[in-house]
Image: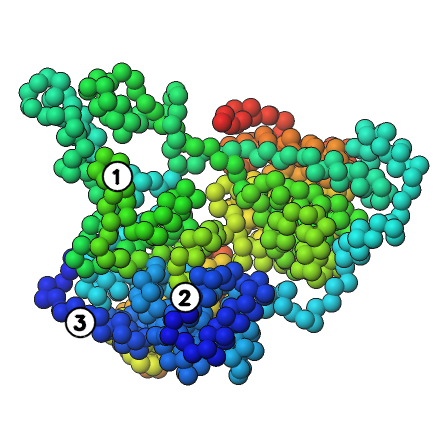
Amino acid sequence: MTGLGGGLGHDVVGFARALRDAGLPVGIAETEAFAQAMSWIDPLVRRETYLAARATLVRRREDLAVFDELFATWFGGPAPARGQPAPLAPRHDPHRVFRTALVSYMAERAEPAAREVDVPEHQKAASGHELLQRKDFADCTPAELEAIARAMRELRLDLTLRRSRRLIRSRRGGRLDLPRIVRDAARRGGAVLALARRRPKLRRRPLVVIADISGSMELYARILLQFLHGVTQRHARTETFVFGTRLTRITGQLQIRRVDAALAHAGREIVDFAGGTRIGDCLHAFDRQHARRVLGRGAVVLIISDGWDTGDPARLDAAMRHLARRAHRIVWLNPLLGRAGYAPEVRGMAAALRHVDDFLPVHDLRSLYELADRLARIPRRKGRSGARSVVPARSGLAAVHAGEVGSRQPSEDRGTR
Amino acid sequence: MSERPSGSRAPAELAARAASPAALTAALAGSGYIVDDALAMTVFLALRMQRPLFLEGAPGVGKTLLASVLAEVFETRLIRLSCYEGLDLAQAAYEWNYPRQLLALQAHQRGDAGAELGDLYRDAFLMRRPLLQAIDAAAERPPVLLIDEIDRADEEFESFLLELLGEFQITIPELGTLRARHRPIVVLTSNRTRDVHDALKRRCLYHWIDYPAFATEIEIVRRKVPGLADQLRRRVVAFVQRLRREDLSKLPGVAETVDWAEAIAHVAALGPPAAPGALDPATVDATLGLLLKYHDDIERVRGALAAQLLAESA
């Protein structure tokens, strides 16, 4: 801390700590940079202190609002004016009330004594693994859900690979690697003995999950959040969003390793658990705020919703069209699809289906296994020409998508590492 | 890549331009770039602390332009590296001229020239890419190194860059380590198509460039499109600022404002307007393609909404 009086030095350190407590990535290096900056400006001019602090301590646009608020508390005065006011980060909103099914679910998990445990049924569930695989989540007892959660933790989602533009060494095939050929030749007195080659490196496609946690999905939301936690843990490049009447990004929360802590944090971010649904508005918000950032590089989008939308179908249609343009493939998982007699005549669902590549059920463990299997076989080519699947045919779905149910299974896409 | 202007000034005079945020603001304005006090402070500190500047913001807010203006202000070279996925050392830093090396090898084998094989890796065969150029050029006066759209590069390149920005040296196995005598002024830009790794951001001073405030944008248009009448300029900028509050796929950037202002100036020059300084809805509809780049957006705004926004921004 060069060039600072004791009092101000204390301020700098304390302020940095307050920012850190609020979740900003402020370390010693940043604190030192701020202290150094203070020696070049007029620390008595509040605006200069503010700007210097902001330049050295903030590295993300989202952190600006929290930073401004803390700066005002720490150095006095009203929050400094910025260009456009950004909404506060949810974790700093003291007025938020968390009345959500997820929270009560977590409370339940936190107190094992209070949990409803049905011993005979538990034994039955453990012995009948096959039975459990086909049991609708909505009909499961807490003990069975536990067993399902354990099984889900083992589930791997191997997304198909795509060719990146980075080149790596290749044993056969690919372009000539001139640098290496020359280097090898130089080592052998100028003789070219073998032709080194390079080929594009294969990378996993990014996965983007957008899950509905509104009232009509409540039964499935708990178990699906556990599923999402497992997916995020095992696969880097997974982005997760949940929505009801508004969209919330919970990627960061699901990265916490312990499932209870992760869900607790996620629950804190989610306001409208088990409320109404406005899929169109939420997907629109996704398109505006996040799509540019997360849908690059051939992303696969997984939408989990029953399609009950209280909003305008035209809006959902437009949002899905934008999404389809950017994503490599859109997979829509609908828990109701597993029910006999379900037809997606819900207006919202019908509007969205036009843009969906795969429409699959997600109501039991088996359907999750099938999902994993399908994600591993997504065609390399984008669009409808590939295996477009709408499953199953036992409902009225055939009427919606007659003739579009593809069965071709592309096998050439399995990447070789 | 711009050459250094002739008649270069004394180093002291150039240093004075970065003496304070205010001096910097004035120097940048002299080259036609208007900054607010927040950006001025960040650039000032970046220069003082010799840290790279990390600029994020929507397309068209002047991130890249700032780098070239900095080169102009400090009368130095601008070296630009545009990023893309798969960008590697050979394209970013240096590459040996393999065809020439192969020819030399063949000559050696035939025995026509007395080329020693050790000579295969000599300076004549070295092709200098932007990062190596930046280190070389720093011998006399630090250049401005613009690493454009870093979000398009991949993680492999990011980790290489991390090393470079820490030490400002490049090791070429065949030649040895080259180190910059002065640190280049480094500007990284990102359109935020993905999040750049935090480790890279930590080495930089970060600034989010927002769309400019009304007064700032007026000043930018005044400088870029001098032919536009005062009253019309206010109408043009007010309309764009109002348009940015709409829910659109892609909001118009400053570059779009300037283009549109120029178009409006041309239209105004065609004939005497009904009322001087007026912007009529028909003209707005006809020129909307200069402001909005998505068909959906144009469809939404054209007609009734454009007229309404025009009235509101008057």
Q: Is residue A249 left or right of residue B127?
A: right
Looking at the image, can residue A367 be seen? yes
Query: How packed is label 2: few (under 14 Cα within 10 Å), some, or many (20 or more)?
Result: some
What is the x, y in percent for residue A309? 71, 54
What is the x, y in percent for residue B183? 26, 57
Q: Are marks 3 and 1 on the same chain?
A: yes
Q: Is residue B268 left or right of residue B243?
A: left
Say which residue appears at 13% left-offset and 18% top-offset: B109
Say which residue appears at 76% left-offset and 57% top-offset: A103
| Residue type at numbered disc 1 | Ile
Name the image quarter holding the N terminus of chain A: bottom left
Q: Are marks 1 and 2 on the same chain?
A: no
Q: Is residue A226 left or right of residue A163?
A: right
Disc 1 target residue:
B172
| Chain of the residue on which disc 2 is drawn | A
| Chain of the residue on which disc 3 is drawn | B
Look at the numbered disc 1 and give the secondary structure of its residue.
Answer: strand
The front one of B166 and B33 is B166
| Residue type at numbered disc 2 | Ala
Measure the alpha-carbon separation of dots 2 and 3.
25 Å
Disc 2 target residue:
A33
Looking at the image, can residue A83 be seen? no
Front tag of 2 and 3: 2
What is the x, y in percent for residue B127? 20, 40
